Amino acid sequence: MAFTRKRQREQQLQLYSKERFSLLLLNLEEYYFEQHTAFHVQHQGSQEERKIRGSLKICSKSVIFEPDAISQPILKIPLRDCLKIGKHGENGANKHFANQIYFIKEHNIVAPYKIERGKMEYVFELEVSGKVEDVVETLLQLHRASCLDKLGDQMAMITAILQSRLARTSFDKNRFQSVSEKLHMECKAEMVTPLVTNPGHVCITDTSLYFQPLNGYPKPVVQITLQDVRRIYKRRHGLMPLGLEVFCTDDDLCSDIYLKFYEPQDRDDLYFYIATYLEHHAAEHTAESYMLQWQRGHLSNYQYLLHLNNLADRSCNDLSQYPVFPWIISDYSSPELDLSNPATFRDLSKPVGALNAERLERLLTRYQEMPEPRFMYGSHYSSPGYVLFYLVRIAPEYMLCLQNGRFDNADRMFNSIAETWKNCLDGATDFKELIPEFYDEDVSFLVNSLKLDLGKRQGGQMVDDVDLPAWASSPQDFLQKNKDALESGYVSEHLHEWIDLIFGYKQKGSEAIGAHNVFHPLTYEGGVDLNSIEDPDEKVAMLTQILEFGQTPKQLFVTPHPRRITPKFKSLSQASSYNASLTDSPVSPGEESFEDLTEESRTLAWSNIAKLQLHEQYKIHKEAVTGIAVSCNGSSVFTTSQDSTLKMFSKESKMLQRSISFSNMALSSCLLLPGDTTVISSSWDNNVYFYSIAFGRRQDTLMGHDDAVSKICWHNDRLYSGSWDSTVKVWSGVPAEMPGTKRHQFDLLAELEHDVSVSPAAEL
């Protein structure tokens, strides 16, 4: 589960810092600046005077004191509620008079914040008394900012303070992993995690990417070795082109770092440097290339939706753009789930808001009467509130952060699958879809394993585990049946209709109106230009609405999405995990398998396999290897892969010598022509490519098929190409003339037709 893995990483970092404090204790859009060892002085000057040791955190809108003893609550004093701040005595103390204070995580228990109101006095004595004047001066400056009447003015002053602090500091070069590292770029940025950002300095060298938080939290430096980077994506953050997300895995939805820059140029420069370093080792796929893999059964429905979410800027680091998945099942009342009955499934051609005809009629009436800009739905299908609605049992601190220290009303919590579905059908403002966790394997978001006190419902029952449908015997069974439904034949035949609504041509414009799929203009990319808004209050309000309301994914397709070729793929219900193999391919009816062998033959086969010994192995591709060719002298190995690259590997030096990408589509096979001067590769983009080994460049392109080329071979001066367009074509050619051969000299000698796609077979 993406969010669970993200949370586990954050908890590991928190163990490093040994603190109960986290950035989630801050308000939204608040920054944590610095911390000082201090003592909370209670009953000062009396016989009952007591000093509690802890850490005093200076934040842009509050002061937070975290006692060392976990039995003591964390104190949070909003600066706006402070009546007076000043130095107290000569022993390094500062005094706060406040009329409101929050008590948090007493005994380290996650629970709604306790609030105490009324005029109160708090004295904090710094361990280093010489710092008290600087601390008081900083607090007074931040207090003035917090007390400004307009939010825009508050934000402007706090931003100025932040930028001043960043300008006075720089990345500590002593944090480099090696003294020989060469600095290439340094700039200011913020590390993005769900609901919060942390400002600091980004630094990139010839070997590593570094981020040093201004406050040193949760660790002094985050370091990523460039050799470990597998994927890198530009992101929009708050509908602005400022984000960059870096992954050190090939298939994990959870990234290793998400950075938000203050200037788009800094983001683009850093992206260019890392992409140049990676060359073709981290080639990005397009939506079209994934679409073709999905159509042909090489990707499960689950995998395909995750890829589309990733390409559409959805990230588990950004709750306003969390990955979105569809409701699939509509039957939550039957004792048994019948996946062979179409009535079991939700209509994927309609958005959630249009599934109930009566509700839709009311919404359309309001839409017609509404002045421009008009929208049909007043809430979105994905927002931070909806994501945490589903995940509150594993992410309670996020919910408390989003809702100012409170859980939602017990009757509005995620109590029941059936109730939630019913409310999405009938509720006046509830149009939410699901999240990937509903189709994963981790059941923790359905179970109150933390024993949280989430409140009592009107009927008197406590909010505990999520109530499951009658057809689910356990949370594990519920998720498994959800996965089976997602990979079912019905969904495979109709999933393209939902993709049209969320990622495709029905997302915007007249097609969206016709499909009853129109949301608030602020949710769409390009819906507002924040840089053009001069009024700071209006800009802050607009940004807050964008972040909290939810955002529509980036549009990936502008024409109708093709349907899946369902008769030609085998069931992928067992491969619905994101880590599942991408190598599953269509199975011909007459194809033999190991299971078809007799018992005697199977025993003999296994005994022969046991005699094989692994000599060497190298992982040089990101995805499945589809072709391999070895030079006559055995010194070079050429491979093609679904990662769209042709690679040349030296057996002598045991190093990768070349990595070539002809397009962003998968390569399906390769061969060496006689003489070992030219390697030919076939591609899913319908072409056959000729690559000159001597000159190190693409030599020619043969275009002769209407669908992906699945296999090529060379025999007696003839090139044979098989394709998913159901043909095998035979071309004339002379290998000795290949270096100077042009496309028109390849003559089509024969064309053989099949009833179905031509799949890879044995060499001629």
Image: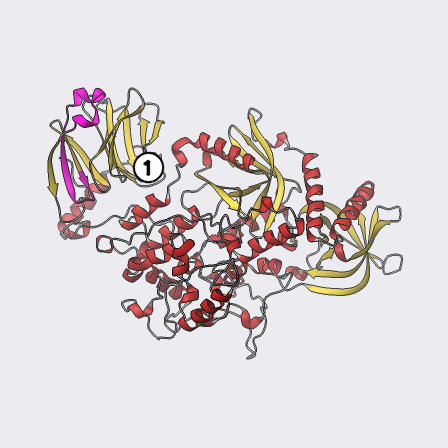
In the rendered image, the vertical position of residue 656 relative to residue 216, given as above or below: above
Image quadrant in which you'd find residue 742: top left
Does residue 615 appear to the left or right of 734 in the view shown? Answer: right
- Indicate the quadrant containing the N terminus: top left, top right, bottom left or bottom right: bottom left
Looking at the rendering, the stretch of residues picked out in magenta corresponds to 722-746
Residue 155 rendering spot, x and y as whole percentages: 68, 48
Whether 616 is among the magenta residues is no
Is residue 37 in sight in this rendering?
A: yes
Residue 553 rendering spot, x and y as whole percentages: 45, 51
Q: Residue at x 28, y 54 (%)?
A: 563
Residue under label 1:
644
Total marks placed = 1
Whether 732 is among the magenta residues is yes
Residue 13 rendering spot, x and y as whole percentages: 58, 47
Question: What's the residue type where badge 1 is placed?
Answer: Ser
In front of the other: 364 or 732: 364
